[in-house]
Image (cartoon, grey):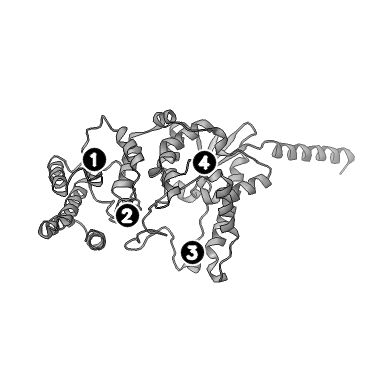
Amino acid sequence: MTIMSKFLFSVFLFFLFFSVHAQKPKVVVLGVGHSTQLINFDQQPAVIRAFINKVDPAAICIERSPEEFSKNDFYEFTYEQQYVVVPYAKSIKKSLHPIDWLPEEMDMDLAFGIKNLEVPRFTRGNQGFLGFTVFTEKNDFEDGIYFADSKVYSEQIEKWYTKHPSKTSSDFPRRLFLYRTFLQAKRIEKVLENYSDKDTILVVIGSFHKNDIEKHLMESGYSIVQPSSFGEINRQDINENFRPEDAYAILSFNLLGMQSNLNKLNPKIIDHAFGHLQKDTSAEKEFFRIKYDLYLSKITSKQAIAYYQKLLTNTDDATAFTWNGVKDKSRIDSYFDLFGNLSFKKRIRLEIAREFRKMANEKMYRKEIELLSEGMNDYKKQMLMVYVQKYLM
């Protein structure tokens, strides 16, 4: 190679290096709680939309792997992803990038004895892994949208990262989580390579991943902007970004799910949802009003049955819930609701049965349950009866 060739090659390498390292977009990592948007007023769907507006990102990275995203397949419990971020990003024409990573079936089988970590058992547990999603801690109801930015929170996660269980054989969940987060960061980096220093990229991801991802990206030369730096999201922001479907999702999660079985509701967000449905005269709204009045002890079981029966008579078979959170339609449940996959009319009948049970009217209770199970296949009928025996009786 001649001196001139070496010189030109050196110049080429310099400019290549400069071009690669000059176009570093800013990154905002919003750590979220999965589905807390339905129980926490300050994290509700409208707040996330308002936050996206404040950031005005060039693109948004979401917590799902590319393979599943291409099939429109999401974790069932990530309400904020498939029901808020994805549709809103599409509506305002923001690019979406799936950046999660999943282990192979063989790896999951070796580690957990389960080939698919997203398939629950025949019936779910009260809560916990592959059980019903419920919220019981004070912070679940009260933390603001920027909770994952705090030093206290990041230190708590850091402790979890570094705490080894007493048995090495029990350490796979922690190791897997760290490896998964590492590959999430790598996928985010691949996305960032396509944007310039004029751009801001938003990552919406489970709060446990936030701290480690930020460290990785900072070490790679990227500038991290904390979500809290974009300022408070006020009531006007919330009202401007509220959608009717938000209201029905909030009411479903609070009044129909395991959350209500545990009597752990959030009246503030429920009242807020009803407030946005003032002009709504639908049967669905009336159904939720009956449920809420029962919770508030404004009506008796006898009165509720009368209201339900009138609603049942005036409702046609085409009436459906706005949102039920069901992913697997072969099941009777959803990720938060024992009976989430019942039709609207069958759900009314179930609630009638529930109130007869409270009144110790065993004959009418059993009659309603028999009517409820008509037309179901054996799989659904068996699942229904297990839940009825365990939770209604």
Q: Residue at x 89, y 40 (%)?
A: 3
Q: Mark 4 vs mark 1: which is more N-terminal?
A: 4
Q: Dot 2, crowdedness within 10 Å: few (<14), some or many (≥20)?
A: few
Q: Mark 3 touching mark 1, by CB under 8 A?
A: no
Residue 279 at what x, y percent from top left? 26, 29
Image quadrant of residue 282?
A: top left
Q: What element carries label 1?
A: helix
Above or below, 275 relative to 263? above
Under mark 2, the amino acid is Leu
Q: Which mark is residue 262?
A: 2
Above or below, 86 relative to 175? above
Tell me if 144 is positioned left or right of 188 in this view.
Answer: left
Above or below, 206 relative to 46? below
Q: Mark 4 vs mark 3: which is more N-terminal?
A: 3
Q: Residue 108 carries which label?
A: 3
Under mark 4, the amino acid is Tyr
